Amino acid sequence: MAGSPSKVLVTFGTRPEAIKLAPLVKALAGHPRFDMEVCVTAQHRSMLDQVLETFAITPRYDLDLMRPAQTLPDITARMVTGVSGVVRDFKPDWVVVQGDTTTALAAGLAAFYEQASVAHVEAGLRTHEKYSPFPEEINRRLVSCVADLHFAPSKRAKDNLLRENCPESRVSVSGNTIVDALLWVVDRLRCELPLKRALDDRFSFLDPTRRLILITGHRRESFGRPFESMCHALVDIVAQAPDVEILYPVHLNPNVQAPVNAILGGAPAALSRRIHMIAPVDYLTFVYLMNRAQIIITDSGGVQEEAPSLGKPVLVTRENTERPEAVEAGTARLTGTDRDRIFDEAMRLLTDDVHRRSMSFARNPYGDGQACARIVERLDAASGGPRALLEEFAGFTRELTPS
């Protein structure tokens, strides 16, 4: 088997995972020492397909597991069963999982059950709050228990893993692969002028004389009153700032659609002309919109990682974040979903140029666009797959065993 390519199965099921793993898929596909295939669970079908199209990725395995009104226990069980079958068929040395989704948890468990090694991309993020974010905080912690290699996006994330007794030899600070994906798309938008013109035409309804605030929101812990509070704050901002307009690609979840349509869609006519609710957009289009916005209000982890590279201040509608580096760097501020806090922070950004510039020019603490190259290099160094790791672990335990 010496010299044989390592077999790598890259797994994902949601749009954020797909975005963050797409550049890694490209890097592995072009590397002679890897035999790589993609397995998607389609935890989020339509939004996942947008990313596959953008990055021209055709999965060998598409489990197509999404069902209407699916519950976490149901989708998790079906994913573990489905990915286990794929692992038995492909027999990978490595199963790559990303982040904190239900797909990451299920694929990690499936790989463990089939005794394939797990490489966890974006490892080590923690809020230390069991139900915030829910279920992602526990998903990510559980994946760490079965992972054989941990690719931490920052030193803080690495330190979290070391405090949980992960061997330091298994933890690499790679940076976040979303920066790789973002820079690839930014380069396309800069170089492909017909694409840029097409997007300008598509969003010609936006008034270039007004300041754009881009909104996203989808977290389970905000469903109900918290989401309603956030929506009311957006209406307040539009009412107070006549030179502002809001663009909101509304998540497909009914728990998001209902309050957004009721509150933003029910705003007075004088305000509703400056509130634009649209269907979710593909990643390339979303990067275009982020670049065009002056402020971003979001509960998305990915946006917190992307915005610093674009110089965009972010208000995070969460009480805590597993990505505190952006807050510490000054590019993001936590507002929670409190109506007054969101309104006050947004108005400060709109009226205080010094404050806005201080958030706009903060550095990106999440990487330099070379995360995938570091991950590929580390996987190549562990090219013996499970056997090499078992030998490494045996050496580690021998060091701990008294003579």
Image (cartoon, rainbow, N blue to C red):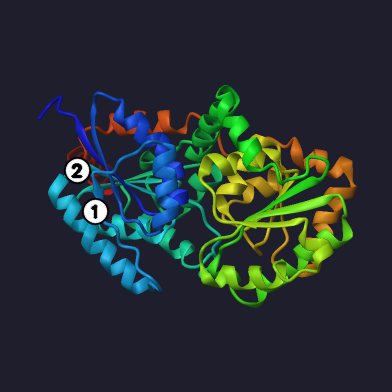
Reply above or below: 212 against 268: above
Which mark is first along the chain, 1 or 2?
Answer: 2
x then y, percent, for residue 26 = 36, 31
Residue at screen point 44% across, 56% down: 100
- List the residue tagged with mark 2: 92
Q: In this view, does 104 lie to the left or right of 249?
A: left
- Say which amino acid is labelled 2: Pro
Check contact, mark 2 vs mark 1: CB within 8 A. yes
x then y, percent, for residue 90 = 16, 45
Q: Is residue 392 left or right of residue 245?
A: left
Q: Can residue 213 be seen in this view?
A: yes
Residue 402, disc:
none
Reply above or below: 21 against 143: above
Q: Measure how far apart labels 2 and 1 are at the Cα level.
A: 9 Å
Q: How crowded is mark 1: few (under 14 residues within 10 Å), some or many (20 or more)?
A: many
Mark 1 residue element: helix
Mark 2 residue element: loop
Q: Can residue 99 be seen in this view?
A: no
Q: Is residue 382 left or right of residue 125?
A: left
Q: Which residue lies furthest to the left in this view?
A: 1
Looking at the picture, tell me which residue is in the foreground, 17 or 289.
289
Q: In which quarter of the image is residue 71?
A: bottom left
Residue at screen point 32% across, 31% down: 28
x then y, percent, for residue 222 = 60, 70
Q: Is residue 109 left or right of residue 154?
A: left
Q: Quadrant of residue 276?
A: bottom right
Looking at the picture, tell me which residue is in the foreground, 215 or 222.
215
Residue at screen point 59% across, 40% down: 287
Quarter of the picture containing the N terminus is top left
x then y, percent, for residue 260 = 65, 68
- List the residue tagged with mark 1: 111
- Say which amino acid is labelled 1: Ala
